[in-house]
Image (spheres, rainbow, N blue to C red):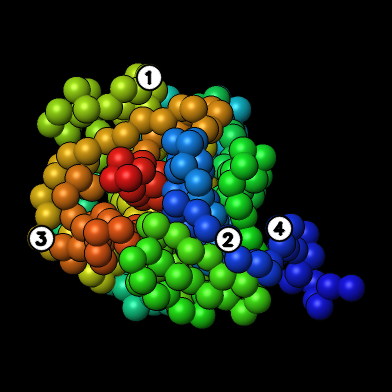
Amino acid sequence: MRDSFFESGENAAVYPTLCKKISVEYVVLGGSLCAALTAYYLNQAKKSVALLAPDVIGGDGTQYLLPRADVSGYYYEKSKIILNELDQIGEDFFKRDLFFFSDRKRHEKRLRSFAEAVNGDFYTSEKACEKFSFDVCAGVYAKNCSAVLNPVKTAKSLAAAISLSGGFVFEKSPVKDIQNIGGYFIPTAKGEIFAEKIADCREVLFDKNEYGLTPYICCSFDAEDIEGWHEKCSLSDCYKKSLSFCFFKDKIYAAAAVSTISSLSRFYINYKSIWIRDVFEKMFFCSNLYKPSTLFLTYGKTLVHGEPVIKKIDKNYYSSLCPFENGIISSVITAKEFVKMY
């Protein structure tokens, strides 16, 4: 019998607890989507890999990244509500394949509450436009795009692929210690792993008081205005239109314009020291894992306060430093970059 409701459904353990001694080339620590992706890419590269989750796969912070953003699958042509609000929306509305709109009264009330909850600065539409020189919006709607990417289910699907391909997946196996003995000896409560290299995907770079809060988008800009956009990103025309940001006290939450628009993964950067087009210096487009295809973005040099995408603890120990550690955007990049280092 399960201990509680929270150990049922998506929160139930599917894979065994580590209760034996095993040896692998790589051990990936964590049960997040970031960890699952890293282990998946290593497994696909024909490496011996073990995914070691302290709780369940899709745990850690992944469950807090479920589609919560203020977006919807409404279509412009079919939405009478939006058509009826055109007078209120005014200059904040753009008729595009992907476009943004602002219902000022509703948005400003909810955004103010969110800003207060995360100790962030609140800006009205006019103030934000003036301060950041961007067009303010409150919602994102995508024409003919209603797919939703569920991070928890995606992590579990990746774990299943690893297991079916000969990799090891363990749940409910928190690490007690990590000892460097010419490789890495990692004991758990009932078992142990020896690995040549470690990918540590357990770090979470957002405050716990941000868990479960809804991120509301508050401004956008035309991606076509970014220097080198077309050369650095292979996308269909309908996804070359706009990107969006949420501004708070010392962070930017960024949302990519993606076909899985209602998932809107976020990452944050220190906006005070970075010119905005530098954020998109590197872009990565992946279509082999997700259908429909999703646009992945990462900042090419630094992410948070000058930290690198991957922190090298020693020559064989890498720790992921993904903002929103389990986020789709940063985790794919981190996993890919880590695999390049083997």
Q: Mark 3 or mark 2, which has the lower sequence index?
A: 2
Which residue is situated farthest in the right direction here?
A: 1
Kind of residue sitting beneath label 1: Ser
Pointers 2 and 1 in contact (C-beta within 8 Å): no
Q: CA distance from mark 3 to mark 4?
A: 44 Å
Q: Which residue is mark 4?
A: 15
The Cα–Cα distance between marks 3 and 1, rounded to whole angstroms, is: 31 Å
Query: Where's residue 97, x and y in %?
Result: 42, 25
Distance from Cα at disc 3 to Cα at disc 2:
46 Å
Callout 1: helix, strand or loop? loop
Q: Is residue 121 left or right of residue 16?
A: left
Residue at 32% across, 45% down? 342
**Distance in Å between CA atoms under marks 1 and 4:** 39 Å
Q: Where residue 22 is drawn, which disc sits there?
A: 2
In this rendering, the label closer to the viewer, 3 or 4: 4
Q: Is residue 143 above or below residue 116?
A: above
Locate residue 88 relative to residue 281 in the image: left or right. right
| Residue type marked 2 | Ile
CB of mark 3 within 8 Å of CB of mark 4?
no
Q: Is residue 49 visible?
A: yes
Look at the picture and state if 270 lies above or below 225: below
Q: How many neighbours does mark 3 have within 10 angstroms: few (below 14), some (14-19), or many (20 or more)?
A: few
Q: Amino acid at mark 3?
A: Ser
Earlier-in-chain disc, 3 versus 4: 4
Q: Quadrant of residue 274?
A: bottom left
Spatial CA distance of label 2 from label 1 is 46 Å
Between marks 1 and 4 in the image, the one whose residue lies nearer the viewer:
4
Q: Secondary structure at mark 3?
A: helix
Q: Which comes before the other along the chain, label 3 or label 1?
A: 1
Which dot marks residue 236? 1
